[in-house]
Amino acid sequence: MTLGINPVDVMAMQAREYESFEILKIKLNALQPMETIRNAVPTKRLVIDANEAWTLEELKVYAPKLQELGVELIEQPLKRAEDAELLNYDCPVPLAADESCFDRTALRICL
């Protein structure tokens, strides 16, 4: 189940409402709501979808904190055109492509 970007209290309430789902995918443009969401569902598996909203510098700050909160995956943190910046970055949380992989040709680049 996916949680859209909302005020923190709304996102936490939705996370609790979706307790029956094994994994919650959370649309996130800033780190602020994650501690509240994690406290609302302390044992839930969490995936983040940044929707190309972060810079590499933000990812470097956010990723260790997200790892501490037990986030299992960060989807599309950087803009598609900026993916090359990730080549020498060892992220503590696995990264996944979304907007960067729009057809089979792009798949080669994402690997």
Image: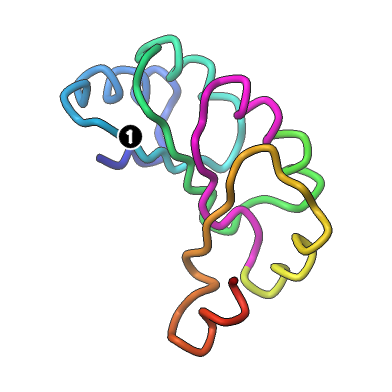
Q: In this picture, is 42 found above or below 59?
A: above
Query: For the point 36% across and 15% down, which residue is it?
Result: 43
* Relative to 71, 31 lies left or right: right
* Relative to 109, 16 lies left or right: left
Q: Position of residue 34 (x, y in %)?
A: 52, 24
Q: Position of residue 39 (x, y in %)?
A: 44, 10
Camera-side residue: 23 or 1?
23
Q: Amino acid at mark 1?
A: Leu
Instruction: Name the secondary structure under disc 1.
Output: strand
Q: In this picture, is 100 found above or below 104?
A: above
Q: Position of residue 66 (x, y in %)?
A: 60, 29
Tell me which corner region of the image, top left, top right, bottom left or bottom right, holds residue 92: top right
Camera-side residue: 52 or 91?
91
Query: For the point 43% across and 27% down, which residue is it?
Result: 7
Question: Which quadrant does the C terminus fall into?
Answer: bottom right
Magenta stretch holds residue 32? no
The magenta-colored residue range is 63-79
* Relative to 20, 60 lies left or right: right
- Residue that numbered label 1 is attached to: 24
Q: Residues within 10 Å of mark 1 (few under 14, many from 20)?
A: many
